[in-house]
Amino acid sequence: MNDWGASVYGDPCRECGYNWNLSLTNAISLVSHLPTAYGGLLTGRSGNEQHPELNWSVSEYVTHVADNLRIWAERLMGVLRGASPLVGSYDENLLAKARNYRQIPVEAAMWSLTRSVDDWLAATEASATSGVVVIHPERGEMTLSDVVLSNAHDAIHHQWDIARTLQDLDGSSAPQPG
């Protein structure tokens, strides 16, 4: 088991409370429910809301999570289909700039998230019995479990970012970790 995430963010995550000891099944379930969870948070929202301590708006976070899941699905499927296990890294801020996240409406971001979750679920299911291992330049060797736990953390962490943004704007207290 790769401990990259826990060593960087803490276990549980110091900010969002994510528990890195989650089972593979539970982590996959968390990701599968993202469109519903995010949709519930965003009902009646423009997506332009932004917390003063964060770099991205709510819609930009949704777009990032969709992109991250899509990229990891591509990585898994590439290795499953015979590509080198060495995967490239990407800079999320450069990707946001290249895709102009600020101009992506929340409705489009949510559509993209739903599609990305579906593709990610298909890739993780296809990888389940393969013993797939990817080698990430910063994170090292990652099993399917490592990938799933890392992806689930990213999505849950940004769900927390979205929730605290909206709560801050509404004048209520920020969500507690966990």
Image: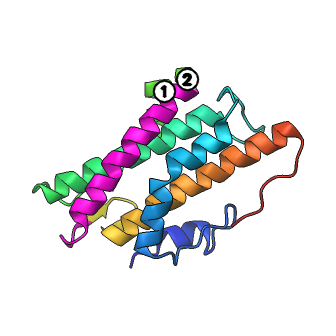
**110 with respect to 25 (left or right):** right
Would residue 58 be found to the left or right of residue 62 on screen?
A: right
Q: Circle 2 sits in a helix, a strand or a loop, which is it?
A: loop
Inspect this view and state whether residue 88 appears.
no
- For label 2, the crowd category at 10 Å Cα-Cα, with few meaning under 14, some 14 to 19 and many 20 or more, is some
Task: Please name the predominant secondary structure of the magenta segment in the image.
Answer: helix
Q: Residue at x 65, y 33 (%)?
A: 57
Farthest residue, direction top? 103
Residue 100, x across and y down, in percent: 50, 23
Identify which residue is drawn at 72% across, 31% down. 49
Query: Which quadrant: the C terminus?
Result: bottom right
In the rendering, at what x and y percent does residue 66 appear?
45, 41
Q: Which residue is mark 1?
A: 108
Q: CA distance from mark 1 to mark 2?
A: 5 Å
Amino acid type assigned to the residue bearing label 1 in the image:
Ala
Label disc, if present, on residue 142 of the rendered structure: none
Q: Where does label 2 land, which residue?
A: 105
Image quadrant in which you'd find residue 134: bottom left
Q: Residue at x 27, y 61 (%)?
A: 125
Which of the two residues, 157 or 89, is positioned nearer the viewer here?
A: 157
In percent of width and height, residue 144 lies at 31, 68
Mark 2 residue type? Pro
Which region of the structure is painted magenta?
106-133
* Picture colour scheme: rainbow
As helix, strand or loop, the secondary structure at mark 1 comes to helix
**Front one among 95 and 104:** 104
Residue at the extreme right: 171
Tell me whether circle 1 and circle 2 mark residues in contact (CB < 8 Å). yes
Number of numbered markers = 2
Dot 1 alpha-carbon crowd within 10 angstroms: few under 14, some 14 to 19, many 20 or more: few
